[in-house]
Amino acid sequence: MRKEIAVIAAAALASFLASFLIAAVLLPSLTGGRITTVTTTLSVTSPQTEDEYLKSTEALLGRVVEWVEGFRGLELREEVEVIALTRSWVVEHWGKGFLNRTEVEIDEVLLKSLLMVPRDFNLTRFRIGFSGYTVAASSDHRIYVVREYFDPRNELRAGATLAHELTHVLQGEYFSTPRPSTSDEEAALAALIEGDANLVSSTYLLEHGGKPFRMRESELTPLDALPFFPYIYGEPFVRYVYERRGWDGVNEMYRDPPTSTAQVLHPEKYLEGWKPVKPDLPSPPGEGWRLLLRDTLGEYFVRQLIRAHLDSAAANRSAEGWLGDRVEIYERDGLYLVRWKLVWEDGRELSEFLSAFEQVLEDAGARRSGEDLWSLEGERIQVQRVSENALLITIHFEANG
């Protein structure tokens, strides 16, 4: 059964808007969530009539279809239609509507309780800033292009954008994947989907005399880096498999997709069949507590947690060796209970993370009030080593504390 893929490209970081478009990508039928990618912004310098614009885009599309089918080794089963939109229409229809405010509020509790953002940080406002700018999108066998940003006369960049979107169309025609059950699984699957499309578009650029843009984790704040994981690490992950097993190996990944960002960050683990563990948490708290979230955050999240306070080298070292985690958030009368259990490959890896996390607590102004207890305004944190390679972090957090 054909899977629909909707790809919405939206702006993200203001510092990149002068020259690049940061795209938020929605692939609901393949991933069940939001992922991200980056394309170069294309500015139209001299307007064409609508008829001329569509004819130019369709002519370019025909040439790119032939190239993508040849390179990717898959043929489109149906004809692709091009639809031109205006930026104002996109802002009105594809802007704030994607924001699930309940999910954002829970995410904000998690980020604040783990000291990744200040107490007065507004995550809703931050994420709204990501929406409203679009260069191209695809849904089923339609590709939408935005006239203010997509110029078919710039055949190099416009062609690469179409190559990316056509790859998503092919993914929808040929592949079906399990729906991810955690944030970590979602990010890993998104890395496969976006990495595939970005490998195709990057190769198109290179073969036509262009140079792909590479975003680096170190260029982003930890909060910005979290949603950009599929773009930063997806293409290197897919390329690693492609160079060893060809497109057959890449296609096989859709039948057995990565389930953790650790597999994407360390692609040799994926090829070796490594899988993360799913640790158990203690019994639910007493009466009156309402479960808001049960999730796995993953190695990449751990890296950004540490990087919010320490340097990238320390963050990378402390996150490596991650074997699995499980987090729960409960609420009762405005008080939140966060419980996060992390498991590491061995005791040395755990000790390295624990040392870094204690530095994070100190950097955030927390005071040690016991052997494994820390406190700061509106928050009590307990960090318990429950086994040689497992750690339990328990946080009581007052939203307005």
Image: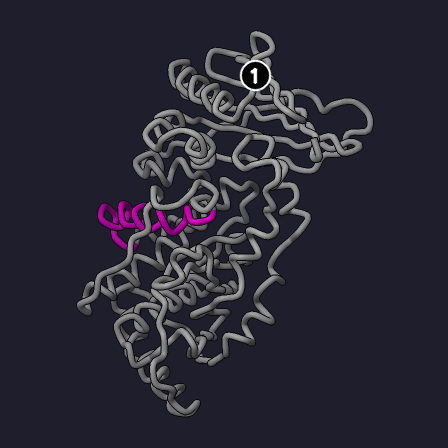
Q: Position of residue 78 (x, y in %)?
A: 43, 76
- Is 6 placed above or below 383 here? below
Q: Position of residue 66 (x, y in %)?
A: 28, 75
Q: Position of residue 203 (x, y in %)?
A: 24, 61
Magenta highlight on residue 231: yes
Q: Residue at x 56, y 16 (%)?
A: 367
**Neighbour tally class for label 1: few under 14, some 14-19, many 20 plus, Cα within 10 Å:** some
What amino acid is labelled 1 in the image? Arg
The residue that label 1 is drawn on is: 367
- Is 34 placed above or below 259 here? below
Quarter of image, res 161? bottom left
- Is 242 placed above or below 19 here? above
> Can residue 275 be seen in this snapshot?
no
Relative to 240, is 369 on the left or the right?
right
Report the magenta stretch's main SS: helix
> Can residue 401 be seen in this snapshot?
yes
Model colouring: one colour
Quadrant of the frame with the C terminus? top right
- Is 222 placed above or below 315 here? below
Which of these two is toward me, 43 or 250? Answer: 43
Q: Secondary structure at mark 1?
A: strand
Which of these two is toward me, 14 or 265? Answer: 14
Magenta stretch: give its range.
227-247
Q: Residue at x 35, y 72 (%)?
A: 42
